[in-house]
């Protein structure tokens, strides 16, 4: 799998070390199952074709996707204490993060192409049934994916060497600030070694952009904390063999997405989605809903042990 920080350069090792610390913390907090909410059509596609759709971030329910994290980095840099930096470093950082020029946000807005598949720690969350799964009379479904074996190895098995990884979303402003400052403290010494060196400037800028994309893709406004979201992130502009962009209709819009192959890396589901459970959301005909899923799953012997569960949410459809 390609790394999010491109070819080797002076900042690559430091950035990968920062990212590894974040991922290690995620693994320690991973629940046994992560749930993907969908409707009947989504269930048919995910199980039948063993593909998951990743939606372009601009079209998600959070209107501040990515921009929220970019703003956090910009504010952190604006308050960065320059007293221990060389004059050239302070000048360089001031130029990059000048709020009047807004060069970093403008560049990211024009060039960034990020797609995500969303999961929730809670497999029976009322707001999720309302927002994502109540699109037909029978209600929705929550698909439970196992996180054991090691969670981070799952998306890395994606065929084609695409830049795909799983992340825990941060909502706590304190945790967000700590991760942001850790990134900055990792990167600034790169340029401060010799602020006039053009190669170091390029290295800093490259790793800064990659780090900001990483950070921004797993930071969200605290208002969304109830979702306890995890997400699989695909950065298309980092991909030398880009996945084709497809489109679906939603709310009168043409929504861009890519199809991800995400096979489990170990037996007994090696080569298949790590599907362990399907929860049937609130609906008026639970018996028919259950029977439909049972007969559907009977076509896939490798999913014979998938558990079927009902919802306890008191939602009237």
Image: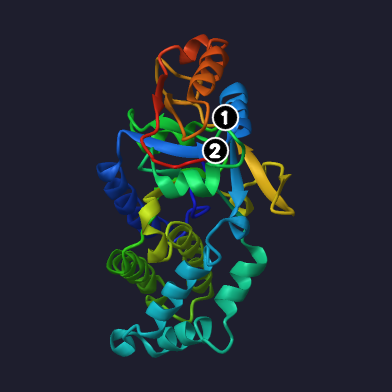
The vertical placement of 97 against 216, above or below, is below
Mark 1 vs mark 2, CA separation in Å: 7 Å
The front one of 261 and 242 is: 261
Q: Please provide percent x and percent y for residue 258.
A: 65, 42
User: Crowding at label 1, few (<14), some or many (≥20) Cα neighbours within 10 Å?
Assistant: many
User: Pointer 1: what residue?
Assistant: 43
Location of residue 296 (image quadrant): top right
The front one of 257 and 240 is: 257
Q: Residue at x 37, y 58 (%)?
A: 225
For the question of whether residue 233 can be seen, the reply is: no
Q: Please provide percent x and percent y for residue 232.
A: 48, 44
Colour logic: rainbow
Q: Residue at x 30, y 38 (%)?
A: 31
For the question of whether residue 183 can be seen, the reply is: yes
**Left or right of 254 on screen, residue 141:** left
Q: Please provide percent x and percent y for residue 289.
A: 53, 23
Location of residue 119 (image quadrant): top left
The vertical placement of 263 against 12, above or below, is above
Mark 1 and mark 2 in contact? Answer it, CB < 8 Å.
yes
User: Pointer 2: what residue?
Assistant: 38
**Of helix, strand and loop, which one carries label 2?**
strand
Q: Residue at x 34, y 83 (%)?
A: 80
**Left or right of 84 on screen, residue 279:** right
């Amino acid at each position: 799998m390609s790394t999010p920080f491109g070819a080797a350069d002076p900042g690559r090792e430091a950035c990968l070390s920062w990212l590894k610390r974040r991922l290690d913390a995620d693994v320690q907090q991973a629940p046994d199952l992560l749930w993907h909410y969908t409707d009947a059509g989504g269930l048919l596609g995910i199980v039948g074709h063993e593909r998951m759709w990743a939606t372009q971030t601009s079209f998600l329910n959070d209107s501040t996707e990515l921009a929220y994290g970019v703003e956090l980095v910009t504010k952190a840099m604006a308050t960065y204490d320059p007293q221990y930096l060389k004059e050239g470093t302070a000048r360089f950082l001031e130029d990059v993060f000048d709020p009047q020029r807004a060069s970093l946000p403008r560049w990211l807005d024009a060039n960034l192409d990020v797609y995500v598949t969303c999961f929730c720690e809670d497999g029976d969350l009322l707001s999720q049934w309302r927002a994502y799964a109540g699109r037909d009379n029978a209600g929705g479904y929550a698909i439970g994916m196992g996180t054991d074996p090691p969670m981070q190895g799952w998306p890395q098995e994606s065929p084609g060497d695409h830049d795909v990884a799983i992340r825990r979303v941060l909502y706590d402003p304190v945790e967000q600030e700590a991760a942001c400052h850790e990134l900055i403290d990792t990167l600034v010494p790169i340029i401060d070694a010799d602020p006039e060196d053009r190669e170091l400037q390029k290295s800093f800028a490259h790793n800064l952009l990659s780090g900001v994309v990483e950070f921004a893709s797993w930071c969200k406004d605290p208002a969304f904390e109830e979702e306890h979201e995890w997400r699989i992130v695909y950065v298309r502009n980092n991909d030398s063999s880009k996945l084709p962009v497809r489109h679906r209709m939603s709310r009168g819009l043409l929504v861009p997405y890519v199809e991800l192959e995400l096979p489990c890396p170990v037996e007994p589901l090696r080569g298949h989605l790590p599907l362990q459970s399907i929860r049937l959301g609130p609906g008026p005909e639970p018996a028919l809903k259950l029977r439909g899923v049972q007969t559907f799953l009977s076509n896939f012997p490798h999913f014979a042990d998938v558990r079927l569960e009902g919802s306890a949410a008191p939602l009237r459809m």
